[in-house]
Image (cartoon, coloured by chain):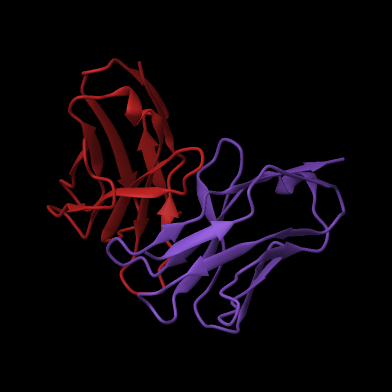
């Protein structure tokens, strides 16, 4: 079935360093799935970080970027310079949210240290 | 402000007991979802609903029931709780349409002893 695989955490990065969290997907039942990054800060629920519904497009939010690459079936999350406040768990997800189709990755815990 | 509120936030239950997790949304969304999240797994869909009176089975419905008495409320019911149902549960609501990105609640941490 369709699935999402992402970087296994935890990932520790020093403040002001760059970050990449890998996400690859397998979508056999839908030709052009929607792709999402959600973030869960400590003590909070999941929040949408960014979404891209068109292959080849890039989404960005709060300094994070991800490009929907259909050729490599990837949607890697990147940030040029992380801050301590970016410490959270990041989830890559595959949509659309239609019936039971959607799929989540296992989540990547990011810890940013001073 | 759009919101999804879950209660309780934390729950300890005994094996064989009945547990009800509640979810309320103020977004006027038709669709609502219940997920559980366990270490080593992504969020997994338990039940979902298309509107008041509707409940549908997700990927892992065994041992769970759901109830959608109104547009705003969606409950997850464990009639006979088991230790394997110890997990973090998330509720979400979303609009119809292929581009929707659901809004999530803060989660309920359930421990079944």
Kindly identify the residue that appears in the image at 21 percent across and 60 percent down. Answer: B50
Percent of width and height locating residue A101: 33, 64
Residue A80 as seen in the image, left or right of residue B46: right
Where A107 falls versus A27 (above or below)? above
The structure residue drawn at horizontal position 29% and vertical position 54%, both measured from the top left corner, is: B32
Horizontal and vertical percent for residue B101?
Answer: 44, 64
Name the image quarter holding residue A76: bottom right
Q: Colour of chain A?
A: purple
Q: Residue at x 61, y 37 (%)?
A: A42
Q: Identify whether A111 is placed above or below A72.
A: above
Q: Position of residue B95 (x, y in %)?
A: 34, 66
- Left or right of A3? Residue B69 is left
Instruction: Left or right? Give the position of A14 relative to A65.
Output: right
Q: Quadrant of residue A74?
A: bottom right
Q: Residue at x 82, y 59 (%)?
A: A18
Residue A68 position (above or below residue B109): below
Question: In the image, which lettered chain appears red?
Answer: B
| Viewer-proximal residue among A110 and A87 | A110
């Amino acid at each position: 079935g369709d699935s999402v695989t992402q970087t296994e955490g935890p990932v520790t990065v020093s403040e002001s360093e760059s970050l990449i969290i890998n996400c690859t997907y397998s979508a056999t039942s839908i030709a052009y799935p929607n792709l999402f990054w959600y973030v869960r800060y400590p003590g909070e629920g999941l929040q949408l970080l960014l979404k891209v519904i068109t292959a080849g497009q890039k989404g960005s939010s709060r300094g994070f970027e991800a490009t929907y690459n259909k050729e490599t079936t990837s949607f890697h999350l990147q940030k040029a310079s992380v801050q301590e406040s970016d410490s959270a768990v990041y989830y890559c997800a595959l949509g659309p949210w239609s019936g039971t189709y959607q799929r989540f990755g296992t989540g990547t815990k990011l810890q940013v240290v001073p | 402000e759009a919101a999804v509120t879950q209660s309780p936030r934390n729950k300890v239950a005994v094996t064989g007991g009945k547990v009800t997790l509640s979810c309320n949304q103020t977004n006027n969304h038709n669709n609502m979802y219940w997920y559980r999240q366990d270490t080593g797994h992504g969020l997994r869909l338990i039940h979902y609903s298309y509107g008041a009176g509707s409940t549908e089975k997700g990927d892992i419905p065994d041992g769970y029931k759901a109830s959608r008495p109104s547009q705003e409320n969606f409950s997850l019911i464990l009639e006979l709780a088991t230790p394997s149902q110890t997990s973090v549960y998330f509720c979400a609501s979303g609009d119809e349409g292929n581009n929707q990105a659901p809004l999530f609640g803060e989660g309920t941490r359930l421990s079944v002893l």
